[in-house]
């Protein structure tokens, strides 16, 4: 999932901690169907990886947390260097 957040790459550790705490609190309230794996923070975007049965749960998490959602893409396959063997 992609979130456009201008200046995301300049967020402080405290700001990132606060965002993470908000996300975790929302997830606890939503139940075990949705799990946040991790996020990649880039210059103006944050890319989040979730395990969820559908896009609606990810959208609901964003709504409850007050987070933007610009793109949700379902991962159908994972490849890595071992795939080339």
Image (spheres, grey):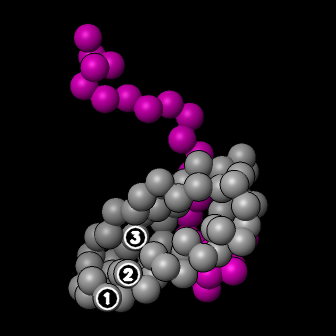
Q: Secondary structure at mark 1?
A: helix
Q: Secondary structure at mark 3?
A: strand
In this orientation, which residue lies closer to the viewer: 52 or 75? 52
Asked whether residue 15 is drawn in magenta, I would say no
Left or right placement of residue 60 versus residue 66 in this view = right
Q: Kindly identify the residue that appears in the image at 44 percent across and 32 percent down.
A: 78
Separation of residues labelled 2 and 3 (CA atoms) = 14 Å
Q: Quadrant of residue 6?
A: bottom left
**Dot 2 crowding, Cα within 10 Å, few <14, some 14–19, many 20+:** few
Of circles 1 and 3, the one toward us is 1
State the image coordinates of residue 54 (x, y, percent, origin top left): 72, 51
Separation of residues labelled 1 and 3 (CA atoms) = 16 Å
Residue wearing tag 1: 14
State the image coordinates of residue 79 (x, y, percent, origin top left): 38, 29
Q: Which residue lies most toward the top here?
A: 85
Asked whether residue 73 is drawn in magenta, I would say yes
Residue wearing tag 3: 46
Residue wearing tag 2: 17
The reply to whether the C-beta atoms of the residues labelled 2 and 1 are less than 8 Å apart is yes
Query: Which span of residues is magenta-colored?
Result: 59-85
The reply to whether the C-beta atoms of the residues labelled 2 and 3 are less than 8 Å apart is no
Disc sitting over residue 66 in the figure: none
Q: Kindly identify the residue that appears in the image at 65 percent across and 68 percent down.
A: 28
State the image coordinates of residue 53 (x, y, percent, origin top left): 71, 46
Left or right placement of residue 59 versus residue 8 in this view = right
Of circles 2 and 3, the one toward us is 2
State the image coordinates of residue 31 (x, y, percent, origin top left): 73, 61
Left or right placement of residue 18 versus residue 85 in this view = right
């Amino acid at each position: 999932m992609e979130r456009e957040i201008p200046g995301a790459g300049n967020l402080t550790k405290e700001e990132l901690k606060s965002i993470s705490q908000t996300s975790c609190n929302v997830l606890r309230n939503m139940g075990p169907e949705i799990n946040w794996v991790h996020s990649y923070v880039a210059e103006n975007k944050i890319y989040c990886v979730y395990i969820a049965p559908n896009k609606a749960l990810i959208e609901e998490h964003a709504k409850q947390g007050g987070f933007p959602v610009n793109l949700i893409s379902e991962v159908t396959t994972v490849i890595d260097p071992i795939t080339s063997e």
